[in-house]
Image (tube, rainbow, N blue to C red):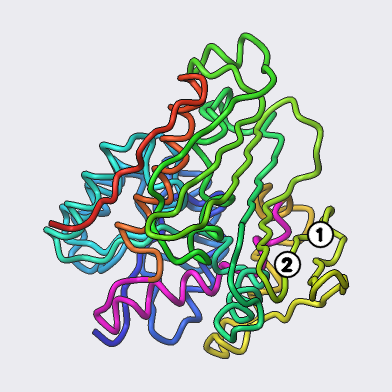
Amino acid sequence: MSRVRIALIGLGFGAEFIPIYQRHPDAELIAICQRDPARLDAIGNAFGVDRRYTSYEELLADPDVDAVHLNTPIPVHAEQTLAGLAAGKHVACTVPMATSVEDCRRIVVAAAEARRNYMMMETVVFSREFLYVDELHRSGELGRIQFLRGAHQQEMAGWPGYWEGLPPMHYATHAVSPLLALAGGRPESVVCQGSGRIADDLAGRYGSPFAVESALIKIADTELAAEATRSLFETAREYVESFAVYADRASFEWGQTQADQPVLFRGELPERVEVPDYADRLPEEIRSYTTRGVYDDEHAHLSFTQGSGHGGSHPHLAHEFVRSIVEQRAPGVDAVTAARWTSVGLCAHESAIRGGERVVVPSFDPG
């Protein structure tokens, strides 16, 4: 396959990927899908996309579509992913993979049976900060990792209704993924405590009362543990997706604010660091999208502006998905990896509801 023919489903945050796929030398964006016809036509006209669908089912019947990229509400991720794989399409999906461990398992099985690529589009492990720390780790500059910590704090008031009262750890991959990727092992078990309380009308939506959930993750076959913290409502904090890694030669901590530079510790000596952009790892045609989005500041999607462009990750995500299909290999965040990262959060919330009981995370090993 020389050029992957892609359809994009969901045109809120999803619209950020349209020009990336249009300009990628190995991709062709051939269709878009949005339930609202007016918005569908507005986006299609703005970007010159002629093939437009208001029905995902009709789009999946299009034989010209090789792959779908889902940027749709969390409650339909599993259903739409399974439908895409059943239709013989490669599937990329924004986080999280699903809202239950069983649905994660179903997707792992479906991807293997369909022999199609599934990739969870986790932004943090393609952010410039992660690429920088991963480079330090691979070079040996960090040394032996001793502990990892991640946090994702965000105020979701005013977002679409399905977010209201969502258990914090049901959307934990931004905090969990860099920890597990750097640790290089699968999550074995998790212990989580809930803290604080959100308003009763929010808590009643999903039966989750906690303002904050904080988990300790045991990494299988290692001496490592990692800590992840999440909040979604009624906790004062500037938006942050962050991680820290502590090792015997050097340690890295994310900046406290979006304007703050991260710190690298060599021994006890702190050094503010300017993280490289890593656009040079991408085809020249899409390098500019590590530092800018589709829209101007006034019209940018809230997830892009709150997350400061998600660390320049969007073109890296699209490139990895496309190249994995062209090269006929598993993508960087394949179905098994996505299931593990997503299920850490699902199992963590279960632990919090049970008062901090340890919960085993399934391995999702094929076969």
Judged by its main secondary structure, the magenta piece is: helix
Q: Residue 129: which numbered mark, if any?
A: none
Which residue is farthest top? Answer: 200
Q: Residue at x 55, y 60 (%)?
A: 178
Check residue 313 for magenta coloring.
yes
Q: Observer-nearest residue: 285 or 126?
A: 126
Q: Observer-nearest residue: 192 or 100?
A: 192
Q: Residue at x 87, y 60 (%)?
A: 259
Q: Amino acid at mark 2?
A: Phe
Quarter of the figure with residue 334 = bottom left
Q: Observer-nearest residue: 131 or 86?
A: 131
**Where does residue 43 sit, x and y in percent of width and height?**
54, 57
Check residue 355 for magenta coloring.
no
Q: Residue at x 74, y 25 (%)?
A: 234
Image label count? 2
Q: Amino acid at mark 1?
A: Gly
Residue 18 is left or right of residue 292, and the answer is: left
Q: Residues within 10 Å of mark 1 (few under 14, many from 20)?
A: some
Q: Which residue is mark 1?
A: 255
**Where does residue 8 sit, x and y in percent of width and height?**
41, 59
**Relative to 160, residue 283 above or below:** below
Distance in Å between CA atoms under marks 2 and 1: 10 Å
Q: Residues within 10 Å of mark 2 (few under 14, many from 20)?
A: many
Q: Which residue is mark 2?
A: 252
Disc 2 secondary structure class? strand
Q: Which residues are magenta?
A: 307-331
